[in-house]
Image (cartoon, rainbow, N blue to C red):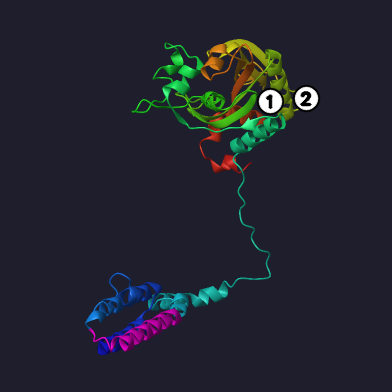
Amino acid sequence: MKDQLQALADEAREAIAKAQTPQDLEAVRVSFLGRKAGRLKSIMASLGTVPAEERPAVGQLAQAVQREIEELLTAKAGQVSDAPPPEKKAKRAAARPAAEADRLDVTLPGRAPHVGARHPMLATMDELIAIFLGLGYKVAEGPEVENHYYAWQALNYPDEHPAMDEQMTFYLNNGLLLRSQTSTMQIRTMEVEPPPVAYIVPGRTYRRDRVDATHHHTFYQLEGFKVAKGITFGDLKGTLIAFARALFGEKMNVRLRPDFFPFTEPSAEFAVTCTLCWGEGCRTCSGSGWMEVGGCGVIDENVLRNVGYDPEEVSGFAFGFGIDRFAMLRHQIDDIRLLWNGDMRFLRQF
């Protein structure tokens, strides 16, 4: 076995000397020292056949051979990592005159790397979250794939409501669906936390909307809700006005018009002054001077009962709006599709 180990060391020295690239060197290492099929391991597997009195000497020789091979590999690694293959050496020699003519002038100022920036939609979302944190709200997040109970039933949707139609919502084969609003987290949060509660829920939502200047099948929404003793519609209106003016300034106006949502009663449509025309009327606001950004209302008593709250003891309000719409208003973007098509000519402006 000693002869085998000496022969192995000689072959390893020769193979390492011939290696030209890091790949060649790695192949040599695996061949001689590999843990599964290395030649040294194969030789040592038969150590049991060596007489007992010779085993210590054979083991010491094997360790010495292994150390020598490892040292040779380490030394060679520094050479092959720096030295290019022969064919590349020839190409570099041929290109050297041109390189000398185009030598780098180190006295010139450096080129600053391109620094990325937050996407305008996500940057807007951060602004909205910061405002509501300042108003005392917490942030909750939840799943984008929901079941029928949290998406519809617990939110007081009647069985025949059109929002549940297959043409309005993205359904999966297993009966689950992509959430069309982050209101689902209103239920999930109140189920595990007693009142008073005050949360916002930012996140991505999906609807089978026809894509145009103000609608998209994928968009970000911010749901907000607050439940405590004595909450009224007036608290809701004051919250929305404080939020809108914190974002856009004191000249921003808020409009609430009666609407219907299964999970709030009374309900209202929430709109703000269009920042593209400031009330004059334009293509983005359909000439109305207002940009509808979401819905709101007093939380329906059935919803409170579904999460175990007593509507005789507490009341609350909820609102939800598209973060994309606010990004458009914040940066005066006249087409929501610009936020989603990944055009760097547009995104570099931010």
Does 249 sit above or below residue 163? Answer: below
- Does residue 244 belong to the magenta stretch? no
Does 210 sit above or below residue 10? Answer: above
Q: To which residue does mark 1 refer?
A: 275
Mark sitting earlier along the chain (1/2):
2
Q: To which residue does mark 2 refer?
A: 250
**Towards the viewer: 183 or 249:** 183
Judge the density around disc 1: few (<14), some (14-19), many (≥20) Cα neighbours within 10 Å.
Answer: many
**Towards the viewer: 136 or 122:** 136
Cα distance in 3D space between marks 1 and 2: 13 Å
Residue 283 image-quadrant placement: top right
Stretch in magenta: 50-76
- Residue type at mark 1: give it: Thr
Whole-percent x and y of residue 74? 44, 79
> In the shown orientation, is residue 38 left or right of residue 86?
left
> In the shown orientation, is residue 312 left or right of residue 30?
right
Whole-percent x and y of residue 139? 61, 33
- Which quadrant would the N terminus be assigned to in this image? bottom left
